[in-house]
Image: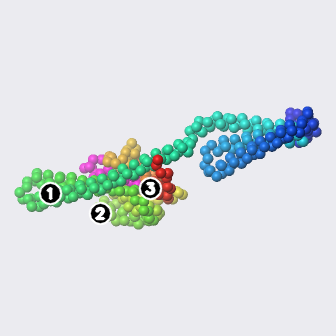
């Protein structure tokens, strides 16, 4: 301990040794070859950490930057040992030299441990060639996806138009049949006409909902949408249902969001109409809509006092055509919540629910304040051309 204490006390004391020039027999050539080589190595070793530091600053988000820093410190200390070796030809600072070597030893061991520990992670890092290939692959996949999306939309559009006109003809002829030949038809035949008309109406709603589903989320011409106005419209559209059920709708102050108006209207329209539809017998629906500012996103809640949903169905209700009730119990197509989810997924948000059977359901919708769909991204950042 005494020795260690003395060592540090006399750290810069060089009186115990002669300068290296006087230690042994050096020719000028030999001595200067040693000194100049050590100084050159030191300069190079100084430059490497500086380049590494610059690299970390210029290229932000470098993976494993801790290993870079350790590696830089290791090289810097190695350089210092070479500088001291050259200086010792005049100034025999053996104590400082030993201390620097000790530090170098510590940092080199830490670097070795870090390199071993992060080896697998470093092997997993992609090279720029691998990134290029992945990017090209993704771009190709995205092109195929948007083409198939376009095809699907076109299919939905054509199907809706082409299916709607024969459907109209069927409905018209059924009502003509009923009106013109009511006297000749027996009650059984009239019942058959009514069943057929109801089925045709269901098909019309189904086609309409499918068209909505295929259309939402595809428009990227965003505008500032005041949700107070949107909700007022939604409530107005549902007035008949609200009056007939004696429902009360309580809407808190809502924000404005830059988005596509129809998309947002679809979401709240579906949630509100479900709140009205899935009511308990004998209980007037009470629906509460709130918005909370959570910094970079808004959280909306739509709470009802209806029949509720069992926990095991929380995910299933968002799948297209999935219904928990028979058509005769509650009418519907099973497309509404899937449409909401499609919009919210495309907007980079979240949708979910919490419910107690026989008490009510709360749907929550989280929407980022700045909505950026993949189409916006593709527009803003030009990708590499596919090879
Ligand atoms: P639809 O209402 O046309 O059946 P949705 O996709 O809107 O289709 O809803 C899917 C299913 O989720 C519904 O069939 C219903 O069983 C259930 N559901 C949706 N909203 C509610 C709600 N507020 N309360 C209880 N059940 C609901």
Vertical order, 250 against 310 (above or below): below
Disc 2 + disc 1, Cβ < 8 Å: no
Q: Quadrant of the N terminus?
A: top right
Q: What residue is shown at x 86% (from left), y 37% (from top)?
A: 30
> SS at mark 3?
helix
Tag in front: 3 or 2:
3
Rendered image: mark on residue 375: 3
* Most distant residue in the front direction: 29
Which residue range is magenta in the image?
325-343
Disc 3 to disc 2, C-alpha distance: 38 Å
- 369 vs 307, left or right, is right
Q: Which residue is mark 2?
A: 240
Q: What residue is shown at x 71% (from left), y 45% (from top)?
A: 48
Disc 3 to disc 1, C-alpha distance: 45 Å
Q: Is residue 364 visible?
A: no
- 243 vs 345, left or right, is left
Q: Is residue 57 visible?
A: yes
Give the quarter of the image for residue 194. bottom left
Vertical order, 228 against 189 (above or below): below
> SS at mark 2?
helix
Disc 2 to disc 1, C-alpha distance: 27 Å
- Name the one closer to the observer, 380 or 127: 127
Asked if ligand 1 lies within 8 A of label 1, the reply is: no
- 382 vs 200, left or right, is right
**What x and y, as percent, mark residue 39?**
80, 43
- Name the one closer to the observer, 379 or 221: 379
Rendered image: mark on residue 174: 1
**Mark 3 or mark 2, earlier in chain:** 2
> SS at mark 1?
helix
* Most distant residue in the left direction: 184
**Mark 2 or mark 1, earlier in chain:** 1
Q: What residue is shown at x 54% (from left), y 57% (from top)?
A: 295
């Amino acid at each position: 301990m005494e020795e260690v204490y003395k060592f540090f006390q006399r750290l810069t004391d060089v009186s115990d040794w002669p300068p290296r020039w006087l230690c042994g027999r050096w020719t000028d050539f030999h001595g200067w070859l040693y000194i100049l080589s050590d100084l050159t190595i030191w300069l190079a070793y100084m430059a490497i950490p500086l380049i590494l530091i610059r690299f970390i600053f210029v290229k932000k988000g470098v993976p494993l930057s801790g290993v870079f820093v350790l590696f830089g410190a290791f090289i810097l200390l190695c350089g210092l040992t070479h500088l001291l070796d050259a200086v010792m030809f005049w100034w025999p600072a053996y104590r400082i030299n030993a201390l620097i070597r000790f530090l170098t030893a510590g940092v080199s061991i830490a670097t070795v441990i870090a390199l071993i520990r992060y080896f697998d992670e470093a092997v997993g890092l992609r090279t720029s060639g691998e990134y290029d290939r992945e990017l090209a692959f993704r771009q190709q996949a995205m092109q195929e996806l948007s083409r198939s999306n376009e095809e699907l939309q076109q299919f939905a559009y054509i199907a809706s138009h082409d299916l709607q006109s024969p459907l109209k003809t069927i409905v018209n002829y059924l009502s003509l049949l009923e009106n013109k030949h009511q006297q000749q038809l027996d009650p059984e035949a009239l019942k058959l006409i009514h069943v057929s008309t109801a089925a045709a109406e269901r098909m019309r709603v189904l086609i309409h909902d499918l068209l909505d589903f295929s259309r939402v989320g595809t428009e990227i011409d965003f505008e500032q949408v005041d949700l107070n106005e949107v909700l007022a419209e939604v409530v107005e559209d549902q007035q008949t249902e609200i009056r007939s059920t004696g429902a009360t709708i309580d809407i808190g102050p809502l924000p404005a969001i830059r988005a596509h108006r129809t998309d947002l209207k679809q979401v709240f329209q579906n949630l509100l109409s479900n709140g009205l539809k899935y009511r308990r017998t004998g209980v007037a629906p009470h629906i509460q809509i709130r918005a909370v500012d959570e910094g970079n996103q808004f959280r909306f809640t739509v709470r009802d006092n209806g029949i509720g949903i069992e926990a095991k169905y929380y995910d299933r209700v968002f799948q297209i055509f999935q219904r928990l009730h028979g058509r005769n119990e509650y009418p519907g197509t099973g497309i509404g919540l899937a449409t909401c989810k499609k919009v919210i997924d495309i907007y980079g948000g979240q949708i979910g629910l919490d419910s107690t059977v026989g008490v009510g359901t709360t749907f929550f919708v989280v929407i980022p304040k700045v909505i950026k769909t993949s189409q916006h991204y593709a527009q803003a950042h030009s990708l590499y051309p596919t090879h």
